[in-house]
Amino acid sequence: MKKYFPIQFNKIKFFKNNFKKFNFNLKNSKKRKRKGFLISKSTMSQKYQNLIDKINNFEKEERIIKTRKKTKKSSSFIVRFTKFEKYQNFINKIQSIKDLNSKTIKKLKSNNYYLSYLKNNSILDQIKNPFEKIKIYQSFKDSLNSNKIQKNSKHDQKIGIIFYADHNLTFVSIMINLNNKINIIGVTEIPIPSNVIGDSLVEDKNELANIVLDSLNLLELIDSPILVILSSSFFNIHTFLASDLKQISESDKKVQSKSPYLPANTFVEFLKISDSKNNESQVRSCYTKRDLIDSWTDTLQIIDQPVIGLVPAAPIIFDLITSIVFEKTTILIDIEANSTTLLLGRNPANLTSHKLPFGYSLYISNIPEGSSANYFERVLNSTKIILSDNNDLLPENIFVMGLGLDKLINDKSSLPEGFKSITSLNLSEYTYLPKKIKIHELFSESINSNICSLASILSSCV
C-alpha cells in the first residue's frame, strides 16, 4: 500500500532559483532584443528597477545571515550533544554492561542475580523506552497517513436485494465495495396480497412486476443488479454420495425418490462437494417446485434488470456458519410465521432439511417471555427427535435466523440457553444505521436479524 506524505519544500531556495532564472533573463535582455525579442517597456521603468534592487539586497542579506550562522555554530547538534556530561555517563554505563564477559554472565545467571539485575536496572529502561516511543510514533504516523488516503468510491457497486417470505417483500438498497464491506442505504417493506402471490406461486406476474419496479424506483435501484432471495420453506435439501447416483440429474431414480413434489413439477439444483475426510464426493440436491421458479423468472423478465441470482435463504447461511464453526453436528433453524425450516449437517458437506409444521405466529401473545420460551422449547424437542433417528448428539448451540427471530426476541425476552443468533457470528461486515438511512419504511417493529441474514447472503453471492 502506498503511503502519502505531505510535500515539503524550501521557500527561500524556491524563490532564489526562480530569481536566478529571472535575473538571467534580465541580463540577456539586450541580446534578445538584438535577435528580435520584444521586451516590455515596463522592465525599464523605475518601479521595476527598484524591485530588482530589493531582490538583490535580499540575496546579499541571506548570504550574510548564513555565514553568521556557520561561524556561530562551530559544530553540529549531534557533536555538541555528545559532549554533555549526562550523555557521557549514560554511554559509560552502557559500555560497562557490554564489557561483561560470558563467564561473568554465567555466574550471574547461576546466582539468579542476572534476571533481577535486568529487571531493576534503570539504564536498560532508558534504552528500551526510546524504542517503544519510536514504535508508538511510527504506528501513530501510519494511522495519520492512512487517514490522508482518500476513499475511492469509483468501484463501489449499488445492489438491490429482494427478499420474499410470509406474504412480505423486503427491499434493501446496498452499497458494496471491493472488500465486500456492505453499507445499507435504504430499506422498505411491502405486504403482498394473496391474489398477487399465493401460497408459493406468483399468481399475478404483471402486478408483482409493477410493485417491484415502484419499490426499486423508490430506492433508486433502477438498472442496478438485484439478488432475489426466497423463503427457506420453498426448498428441500438432501445430500447423496456421488457413488450412489448413476447420473447427477433429475431423472435419476434416487434423486426422484427424495423429492416431495411430483416428478413433472420438480426442479433440482445440484452442488457437488468433495469431503476431504472421507475422500469421497457428495452431491447436495436442492428441490423446489418448477412452476414456482418459472413464476419468479417470468416476473424478473418483465422487470428487465440485471439479476445476480435467485437463491434460498438458509443453505447459504449454513455454509457460512460451517466455515467458521467446526462441530460434528451443526443445526440452523429459519423461523417464519407458519413454519420452521431446520437444517441439519453432520459435516460441512452432508446437509439435509426438515420442515417443522409450526412458526412464530402460534406463539405471539401479550406475554413475550412466555411465548418465546414455549416456541424454543418445542423446537428443541423436535430437534432431539430428528437427532435420535440417526443417533446424533445435540450440538452446543442451535443457530437461529429469520423474520421470526425479530418477532420472538426483544428487550423483554432473550434467546434461551442452547440457542444462538447468527448475528453474534459476524458472518459479514455491514453497516446498518436506521436513523441515518434516508428511506426506512417498515411495518415490522424490528428487522435487525433479517438484515444480518440478507447482508451475509449477499456477501457470499458476489
Image: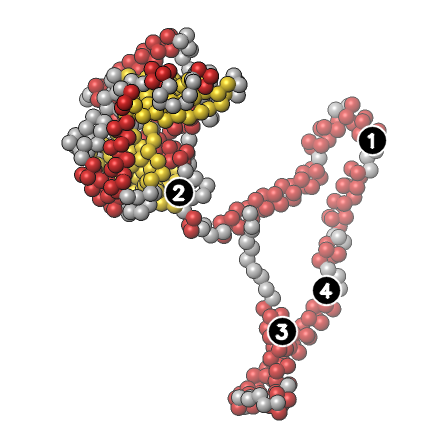
Instruction: Point out which mark residue 176 bears.
Output: 2
Of the residues under marks 1 and 2, which one precedes in the sequence? 1
Question: To which residue does mark 4 refer?
Answer: 73
* Residue drawn at x 31%, y 35% as measured from the top left: 228
Of the residues under marks 2 and 4, which one precedes in the sequence? 4
Cα distance between the residues tagged 4 and 3:
26 Å
Q: Is residue 380 above or below residue 20?
A: above
Numbered disc in front, either 3 or 2:
2
Instruction: Locate residue 72 relative to residue 300 in the image: left or right.
Output: right
Cα distance between the residues tagged 1 and 2:
61 Å
Describe the element under mark 4 as helix, strand or loop.
Answer: loop
Cα distance between the residues tagged 2 and 4:
59 Å
Instruction: Locate residue 111 relative to residue 293 in the image: left or right.
Output: right
Which is more toward the observer, 53 or 461? 461
Cβ atoms at labels 3 and 1 below 8 Å apart:
no
Of the residues under marks 4 and 3, which one precedes in the sequence? 3
Question: What amino acid is at disc 3?
Answer: Asn
Which is more toward the observer, 79 or 418? 418
Question: To which residue does mark 1 refer?
Answer: 102
Crowdedness near tag 2: few (<14), some (14–19) or many (≥20) residues, C-alpha within 10 Å: many
Describe the element under mark 3 as helix, strand or loop.
Answer: helix
* Residue drawn at x 62%, y 74% as measured from the top left: 16
Cα distance between the residues tagged 3 and 1:
59 Å
Question: What amino acid is at disc 1?
Answer: Ser
Cβ atoms at labels 2 and 4 below 8 Å apart:
no
